[in-house]
Amino acid sequence: MTKLKEGMKAPYFEGSDQNGKIVKLSDYAGKKVILYFYPKDNTPGCTAEACNLRDNHQDLLKKGFAVIGVSMDSVKSHQGFADKYSLPFPLIADISKKILEDYGVFGEKKLYGRTFLGIMRTTFIIDEKGIIEKIISKVDTKNHTEQIFSIFNS
């Protein structure tokens, strides 16, 4: 697996969202995509990140961004999470880990001195032509939209 870098073509993906609808990268041709990978529905950091993107969703749309979340949670889990927090964007259920592995965000993590396999919280900004414009590996969950805007307003 090649480590993805800014300037590379984004790997194609497709998967079912919280409504059972198939979401594909090709659906977003001509738009900037915020593709964010997060560890688990209904956990503090993931909820903060999703709610920050939700609260700023209209501003993101005005600036030409579409938002897509991805985790290993099931469609049913995503549905509950999206409903509970009124999330207006698709959350892809990547149970097979194909998208996670294609984007290189599933691997060894350390938490409290313990090593385990999991999702490394990462956001990819994909441009209108499907090229990775920016990779954010140190995500500020409470201020993620501001983090994104600071990159594109500088």
Image (tube, grey):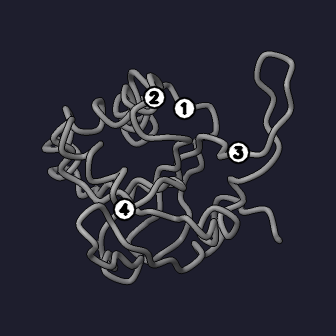
Please, what secondary structure does the residue beneath circle 2 have? loop
Q: Separation of disc 1 and disc 3 at Cα?
A: 16 Å
Looking at the image, residue 14 sits to the left or right of residue 138; the answer is left
Q: Separation of disc 1 and disc 4 at Cα?
A: 24 Å
Label for residue 43?
A: 2
User: Which quadrant of the view contains residue 86?
Assistant: top left
Give the position of the C terminus as an image quadrant. top left
Please, what secondary structure does the residue beneath circle 3 have? strand
Closest to the camera, between mark 1 and mark 3, is 3
Vertical side of 86 occupied by 71: above or below? below
* For marks 4 and 3 on the same chain, the one whose residue lies earlier in the sequence: 4
Residue at point 68%, 53% (across, down)? 105
Tell me the residue that label 3 is attached to.
118
Please state which amino acid type lies under the numbered disc 2. Answer: Thr
Residue at point 71%, 53% (across, down)? 106
Mark 3 and mark 1 in contact (Cβ < 8 Å)?
no
Please, what secondary structure does the residue beneath circle 1 have? loop
* For marks 2 and 1 on the same chain, the one whose residue lies earlier in the sequence: 2
Mark 4 and mark 2 in contact (Cβ < 8 Å)?
no
Please state which amino acid type lies under the numbered disc 3. Answer: Gly
Q: Separation of disc 4 and disc 3 at Cα?
A: 18 Å
* For marks 1 and 3 on the same chain, the one whose residue lies earlier in the sequence: 3
Closest to the camera, between mark 4 and mark 3, is 4
Residue sitting nearer the eye, 1 or 151: 1
